[in-house]
Image (cartoon, rainbow, N blue to C red):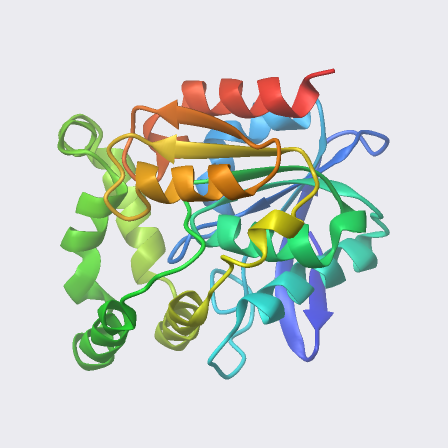
Amino acid sequence: MPMIEVDGCPIHVEVEGPAGAPALMLSNSLGTTLNMWDPQARAFTEKFRLIRYDRRGHGRSGVSPGPYTMERLGRDALAILDALGVQKTHWCGLSMGGMVGQWLGAHAPERMERIILSNTSCYYADKEVWNARIRFIREKGLSAIVEGTMERWFTKGFRERSPQVIQRMTDMLLATPLDGYIACCEAVRDMDHRALLSNIAAPTLIIAGTQDPATTVQDAQFMHARIKGARLAPIDAAHISNIEQPDAFTRTALDFLTAK
């Protein structure tokens, strides 16, 4: 699959599905790769030309110097679409991918068909939470946050019954370049999309994990109230809802994306 260079940074991209089908672009959470969407890939490629990519600083993409911004990451997505010759796409982003989706919905409306914002937020008032995380991992490394991250990402019951999935996600987190992870933390810390939400005109679905401690139902409700016509769909999961509840997530997403 192609490596697309964006302003000097190589971005790893994978494209699957029928060439003539509508495009659907997926965007990952912080500390994961495009493989976090594996549970959805087969079903999505039956309906769409599926575009997955590793965000800069993650996976097989390059690590340009930080800090990053949501604008930088949004422009990466647009550059990928340009390189692939895709004029308009559906968007499905989880957590940080949803944050990039908000930027795109407000700043590149002509490129967006329908938008799914899953397990995400538009703003963090307490910047010190992110500053503390950055200081901690600079000193201790990503291995020091594995346990706490898995507790945020997945409910206790899921962690207990799915140890192989937890190990796979742990490996994905630990393989993330430290500098890339930190640069993306800075983008999340500095994000403030509150004023952008009313500018999102594309049909929008907001998915909220009812047990998500990282991006709460209240965060989803805040966005839902400010994006005109947005729908809100709860899923019984913690933060990485597409993995904890793959069938429910896939069904919810496809129902929205294929609705007449």
Q: Measured from the top left, where is residue 237 in percent x and y?
A: 29, 29
Which image quadrant for residue 22?
A: top right
Residue 238, by quadrant, is top left
* Residue 25: % across, % down: 65, 43
Q: Nearer the viewer, residue 165 or 145?
A: 145
State left or right for residue 102 relative to residue 32.
right
Location of residue 189 with respect to 66 vertically, above or below: above
- Residue in view at x 61 percent, y 68 percent: 71
Q: Residue at x 22, y 52 (%)?
A: 149
Quarter of the picture holding the C terminus: top right
Q: In this orientation, does residue 119 appear? A: no
Q: Percent position (x, y) of residue 258?
A: 69, 20
Q: Looking at the picture, tell me which residue is in the foreground, 5 or 220.
A: 220
- Tell me if residue 129 comes above or below residue 196 in the rendering: below
Residue 197, horizontal then vertical, whole percent: 57, 50
Residue 177 relative to residue 49: left or right: left
In the image, residue 126 sits, relative to residue 91, either above or below, namely below
Q: In this orientation, does residue 35 appear?
A: yes
**Camera-side residue of 58 and 203:** 203
| Image point (22%, 29%), residue name | 162
Res 74 → quadrant? bottom right
Q: Left or right of 126: which side holds 249?
A: right
The total number of labels drawn is 0
In the rendered view, does 100 fall on the left or right side of 147?
Answer: right
